[in-house]
């Protein structure tokens, strides 16, 4: 009976808000909730929110100490104080209201982060990889979950909902960990984020047809799509022709910008409800329609704090609905987790590898994406509310989310070490990396990498890209004297097409340096700062290179001023400190501004930028 009560509470969030419709869902207590603003109920709600925030904070501190996802702490907090834990929060009304508010804000912010322009500019690699991951995940998911006996039809769609849930990865977990590792702007990081955005769009499309699953006739499906199209068109037209005029006039008043964003979110949510769609769907569309808005960054910054508050409440309320698992729930949760890991490796790694992204750039996104999304929990709860899936299936998905959240955080933090070991295993099974995929004369020339040139650049990022552009402008003949060693497939292809000598390899591996012939170079440049190096530091690289080549002139890069002397002691001949050159540039800018020459300085810089052909823009 308790499970049924929680399912009813969940239904409150997503069902139509009219009393008749709610009564048809078998949720009479929700009709009584219309009088929720009575004194006793309001006092109870405030008390429940207080408990939710207090326990979320306490368990969040523990999660931070043990380096675990905060979402996990919020779910556990909800379970502890909820009906299946200590029972301090028992009101279905409280759980429903807390959860719905959090869900609306979470979907609004997810929408704000979906930049359609970036998807269009993403290029074929991300689009094909995301398409392969989603399509492959859906096909494998249906086959797997139907194969283990879950329902797919007749009004019950447990297999379909789990398939969609397993096709989505966690934006919150991935972005947080990659940000801490400073990998958001690397090639695997950009591929990962691109796939995440397209996963969100896939989830939006599923939510559009989800109400019609039990009666998937062409007419009903077209009506659902038409309603979504009308909602999107309304939101885009208003955001294009009305919002810019309004926000331009209130841009200097932060309070009105925040209120305007919230008003927009609930306005589109209300329009969605009138179109017989959910408020949650409206909140998502409201966010997407603002994502390319000139004031989107300002809106995001102002709503973030409020968003975090309500997202916390959403996951705490979700934790309250998770019952103590029995054997069948745990078994299904483990099956979901194993399938998610296996399918993500297959459907993400394979398309990227076939597009010749190299083993490393193909493996890292697969490892990054190997968990279930918080958006998956939203999809699952809509299924519970609509009566499409059972509460045991929803509970198993929640437990799988928790299990994969912990495991994924551990894996992403150690992804470089895991990838290096996996590459060795894959090559033994016959998979060839980029540097091994040549044939004929190219393979012969590359064999043993013995033809390393006079100048070697170890690692290729923005500083090296700028250096190559500078050499190209002033001394193009010197490009033929340079060898580059890096494992970025974009760098490998682009420089090879320009006729430069490139060796695909991991500079943190001493064997790579040895076989590349670094011992024969005259000048060796380390231009990648420690914050971006994987598996190595500039000091360690200097020591390795100096051991291989006692006579070369070694130029290294220091992040900190205290690192400079350490580099010299390790064997460097010259150490660059990027902040010094940047400071000189900023000082020149200030001088130009003081003398009224800033426009001339900008024009000179624009002219220099127009002449450059950078590998990494």
Image: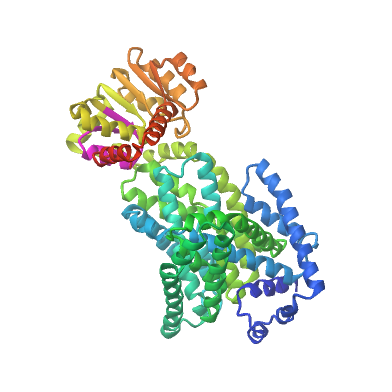
Count numbered badges in the picture. 0
Q: In the displayed structure, would residue 455 be above or below residue 125? A: above
Q: In which quadrant of the rendered view does residue 453 lie?
A: top left
When asked about the image quadrant of residue 87, the answer is: bottom right
Residue lying farthest to the bottom in this orientation: 20
Q: Give the quadrant of residue 41.
A: bottom right
* Highlighted magenta segment, given as a residue range: 483-504
Q: Position of residue 471 (x, y in %)?
A: 24, 29
Relative horizontal placement of residue 113, taking residue 129 as reference (left or right): right
Q: What residue sits 54% from the left and 68% below the top?
A: 265
> Between 293 and 559, which is closer to the camera in this rendering?
293
Q: Is residue 176 in sight in this rendering?
A: yes
User: Does the magenta-highlighted stretch encompass residue 498?
Assistant: yes
> Is residue 129 placed above or below 32 in the rendered structure?
above
User: Looking at the image, which is closer to me, 19 or 612?
Assistant: 612
Q: Can you say whether 488 is above or below 45 in the image? A: above
Q: Quadrant of the N terminus?
A: bottom right
User: Residue at coordinates 56% horizontally, 73% vertically from top-left?
Assistant: 279
């Amino acid at each position: 009976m308790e499970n049924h009560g929680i399912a009813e509470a969940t239904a409150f969030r997503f069902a139509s808000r009219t009393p008749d419709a709610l009564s048809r869902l078998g949720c009479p207590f929700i009709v009584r909730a219309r009088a929720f603003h009575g004194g006793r109920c309001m006092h109870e709600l405030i008390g429940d929110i207080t408990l939710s925030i207090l326990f979320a904070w306490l368990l969040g501190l523990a999660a931070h100490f043990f380096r675990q996802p905060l979402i996990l702490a919020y779910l556990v907090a909800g379970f502890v104080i909820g009906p299946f834990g200590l029972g301090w929060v028992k009101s279905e009304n409280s759980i429903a209201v807390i959860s719905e508010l959090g869900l609306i804000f979470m979907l609004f912010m997810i929408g704000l982060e979906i930049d359609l322009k970036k998807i269009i500019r993403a290029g074929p690699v991300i689009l094909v990889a995301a398409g392969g991951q989603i399509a492959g995940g859906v096909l494998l998911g249906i086959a797997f979950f139907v194969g283990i006996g879950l329902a797919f039809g007749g009004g019950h769609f447990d297999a379909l909902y789990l398939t969609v849930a397993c096709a989505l990865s966690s934006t919150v977990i991935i972005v947080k960990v990659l940000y801490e590792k400073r990998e958001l702007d690397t090639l695997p990081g950009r591929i990962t984020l691109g796939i995440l955005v397209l996963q969100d769009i896939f989830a939006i499309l599923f939510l559009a047809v989800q109400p019609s699953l039990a009666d998937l006739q062409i007419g009903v499906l077209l009506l659902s799509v038409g309603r979504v199209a009308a909602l999107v068109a309304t939101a885009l037209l208003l955001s294009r022709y009305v919002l810019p005029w309004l926000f331009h006039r209130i841009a200097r008043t932060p309070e009105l910008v925040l209120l305007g964003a919230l008003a927009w979110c609930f306005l589109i949510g209300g329009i969605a409800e009138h179109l017989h769609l959910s408020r949650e769907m409206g909140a998502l569309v409201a966010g997407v329609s603002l994502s390319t808005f000139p004031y989107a960054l300002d809106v995001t910054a102002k709503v973030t704090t409020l968003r975090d508050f309500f997202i916390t409440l959403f996951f705490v309320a979700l934790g309250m609905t998770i019952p103590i698992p029995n054997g069948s729930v745990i078994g299904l949760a483990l099956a979901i987790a194993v399938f998610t890991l296996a399918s993500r490796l297959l459907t993400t790694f394979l398309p990227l590898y076939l597009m010749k992204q190299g083993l490393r750039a193909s493996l890292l996104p697969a490892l990054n994406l190997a968990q279930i999304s918080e958006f998956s929990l939203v999809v699952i709860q809509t299924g519970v509310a609509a009566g499409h899936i059972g509460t045991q299936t929803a509970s198993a998905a929640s437990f799988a989310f928790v299990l994969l959240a912990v495991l994924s955080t551990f894996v992403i933090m150690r992804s470089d070490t895991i990838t290096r070991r996996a590459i060795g295993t894959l090559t033994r099974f016959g998979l060839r990396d980029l540097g091994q995929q040549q044939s004929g004369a190219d393979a012969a020339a590359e064999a043993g990498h013995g033809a390393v040139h006079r100048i070697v650049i170890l690692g290729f990022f923005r500083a090296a890209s700028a250096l190559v552009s500078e050499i190209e402008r002033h001394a193009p003949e010197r490009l033929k004297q340079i060898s580059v060693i890096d494992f970025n497939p974009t760098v490998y292809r682009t420089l090879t097409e320009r006729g430069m000598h490139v060796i695909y390899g991991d500079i943190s591996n001493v064997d790579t340096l040895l076989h590349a012939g670094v011992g024969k170079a005259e000048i060796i440049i380390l231009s990648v700062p420690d914050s971006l190096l994987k598996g190595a530091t500039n000091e360690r690289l200097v020591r390795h290179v100096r051991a291989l080549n006692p006579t070369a002139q070694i130029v290294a890069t220091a992040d900190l001023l205290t690192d400079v002397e350490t580099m010299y002691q390790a064997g460097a001949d010259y150490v660059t400190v990027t902040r010094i050159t940047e400071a000189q540039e900023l000082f020149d800018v200030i001088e130009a501004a003081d003398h009224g020459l800033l426009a001339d300085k900008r024009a000179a810089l624009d002219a220099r930028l127009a002449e450059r052909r950078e590998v990494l823009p």
